[in-house]
DNA sequence: AAGATTAATGCTCAATATGAGTATTAATCG
DNA sequence: CGATTAATACTCATATTGAGCATTAATCTT
């Protein structure tokens, strides 16, 4: 029959000025989730309720990501379907996780984790991540060599594309494709039946079920979306400097941005306005503070707003 | 509990050279659909099987659209969740609908219908649709006037945005937003409890459940996607002229394209190649025939490919 | 056969948008 | 006071985009 167990899974993202973080349960091994309850008004309402109940965090911007089905169960168990969402949370709202209800049903605390802990290779802007990526690529290479020779061509091409090697350029939106290639190659712990762990700084932290795949989908979506919709502002506090905004973009995208062009484009869009105040936290020339013009965005919610992310050479 | 009835719904699109068509059942009142069966390998596999069983059409390019939940049922019925997909079908493959298994479970034939029958106002390229759009906008205006005066401002702004009035420009991707505004205003038959029908050439054909909403989602997705991914080729036959390609884009987007710029950009992308043959069907200077370079696309599946759709003035 | 019609093509032009620099200014820190 | 940290101002070449004019090559009509 078509009765399936439907689960809602949320990827809550917050940017604390340093790195994007995701809300996790079970010591970082799963994402907040809950059942779709018949009495909730909508999927979104159901998800908000579940997350707030489970973690105490108020959910802001919310958008559906993708619906996954697990593999068909052998026994008569109902099939599990996961409807996943991306939720963006402003710093401040995220604090409630540590106070309100910091324990999930299993008794382990809800915790915010650097999303690059799960995908170290996605942080291309961070130079000290390079060695680990080198190790990973070496293992990938070894795996390819172990496959039947007629697949070499295809696999190497795929590797070059998704990891931006041999003339291809790094595409920060291919988070899911990279994860899936690594999964296929058995290089992430989830791919093994036994929980062998592996070296987390190379293969990233593992998660239960397909939660890391969902996280990859969320990262890819967010990276894609900040280029054409002003969603980055959903992660910013009320007031912020242009540098802080740029850092948010850089840390989300995992790559550097040309500062002057970034400012030019942001100014050009007219989505923010000066507050008149200045920030002198960084020790340097004080930076003007800006605020997001929510009213304007309502108007052109649709028009799009690109952010200048430098092309890789 | 979290047991819900999960339904898969497909929007199959074909372009026959004249207009985009969608595959419908029940005399055009519903979309092909089927349950998620526990023994199918994946959601996609389940959907392909259901559609082919129900309509006899082989599904080509397939992508997930969105997962909808209906309103909470009053009685103890399980809740219905619909996972919707967009499927693009090449002409030829679509023929099978008329031969193989032309009757659905209820005994009514599967039929391809002009998608603008369901959304007449979406066809902005068609001049004779203008009067009907005028009537619709008039009714929308009347409805706004009936609302409480403090909502007028907001509603008129929303109307101007989604319908491209008073200085706003028409955005062909807002299919869903337009439908939802009309729904809210009670201007589409689905919004009424009783099936009063209404004048289909103004309000469009109605569908059961939320199938027209799903169709709107599919149209919006396709219109958005042809701008940055080469999906339009999924609707083209093996060989085609540039003019045919342009018409496919125009009919899908519901707006005109600048011919020379269109050709320039298509040529620039290098996604197609001449076959060496010519078509002299149209009675004019013979047009060169092209074919889509599938191999190239595998390489830059990701790179994107924009199509020049003219901005509205 | 002449002229209308239907398209395909070739080419120009201005307005933006983009990527990558250099140079200057204004503050803090030690 | 000078090093450091940023913010900010400008320049420049190149690419992209929107819009148009002009020409060519076929068929269709009379």
Image (cartoon, coloured by chain):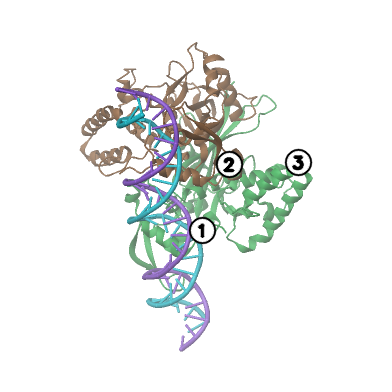
Chain colours: A green, B brown, C cyan, D purple
Q: Are marks 1 and 3 in contact (CB under 8 Å)?
A: no
- The foreground one among B47 and A168 is A168
Q: At which x and y percent is residue B80? A: 49, 25
Label 3, secondary structure: give it: helix
Q: At which x and y percent is residue A25? A: 59, 46
Q: Which mark is residue B297?
A: 2
**Can you tell which quarter of the image residue A270 is in?**
bottom left
**Can you tell which quarter of the image residue A73 is in?**
top right
Separation of residues labelled 1 and 3 (CA atoms): 36 Å
Label 1, secondary structure: give it: loop
Residue at 44%, 49% (x, y): give it: A228
- The foreground one among B77 and A235 is A235
* Number of residue marks: 3
Pointer 1 indicates a residue of which chain?
Answer: A
Q: Is residue A175 above or below residue A18?
A: above
Q: Quadrant of the C terminus of chain B?
A: top left
Q: Which residue in the protein does label 1 denote?
A: A310
Residue at 40%, 71% (x, y): give it: A286
Q: Which mark is residue A150?
A: 3
């Amino acid at each position: 029959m078509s009765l399936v167990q439907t689960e809602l899974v949320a990827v809550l993202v917050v940017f604390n000025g340093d790195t994007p973080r995701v809300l996790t349960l079970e010591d970082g091994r799963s994402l907040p989730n809950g059942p779709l309850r018949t009495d909730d008004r909508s999927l979104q309402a159901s998800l908000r309720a579940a997350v707030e109940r489970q973690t105490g965090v108020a959910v802001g911007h919310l958008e559906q990501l993708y619906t996954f089905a697990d593999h068909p169960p052998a026994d008569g168990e109902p099939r599990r379907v996961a409807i996943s969402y991306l939720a963006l949370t402003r710093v401040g709202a995220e604090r409630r996780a540590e106070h309100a209800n910091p324990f999930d049903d299993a008794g382990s605390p809800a915790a915010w984790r650097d999303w690059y802990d799960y995908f170290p290779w996605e942080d291309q802007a961070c130079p000290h991540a390079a060695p680990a990526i080198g190790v990973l690529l070496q293992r990938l290479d070894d795996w390819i060599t172990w496959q039947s020779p007629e697949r070499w061509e295809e696999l190497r091409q795929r590797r070059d594309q998704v990891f931006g090697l041999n003339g291809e350029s790094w595409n920060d939106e291919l988070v899911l494709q990279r994860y899936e290639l690594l999964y296929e190659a058995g290089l992430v712990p989830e791919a093994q039946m036994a929980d062998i762990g592996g070296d987390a700084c190379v293969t990233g932290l593992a998660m239960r079920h397909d939660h890391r795949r969902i996280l990859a989908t969320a990262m890819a979506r967010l990276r894609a979306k900040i280029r054409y919709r002003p969603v980055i502002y959903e992660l910013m506090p009320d007031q912020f400097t242009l540098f802080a905004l740029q850092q948010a973009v850089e840390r989300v995208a995992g790559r550097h941005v040309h500062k002057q062009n970034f400012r030019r484009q942001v100014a050009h869009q007219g989505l923010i306005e000066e507050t008149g105040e200045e920030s002198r936290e960084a020790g340097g020339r004080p930076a003007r503070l800006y605020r997001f013009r929510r009213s304007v965005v309502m108007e052109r919610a649709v028009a799009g707003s690109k952010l200048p992310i430098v092309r890789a050479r």
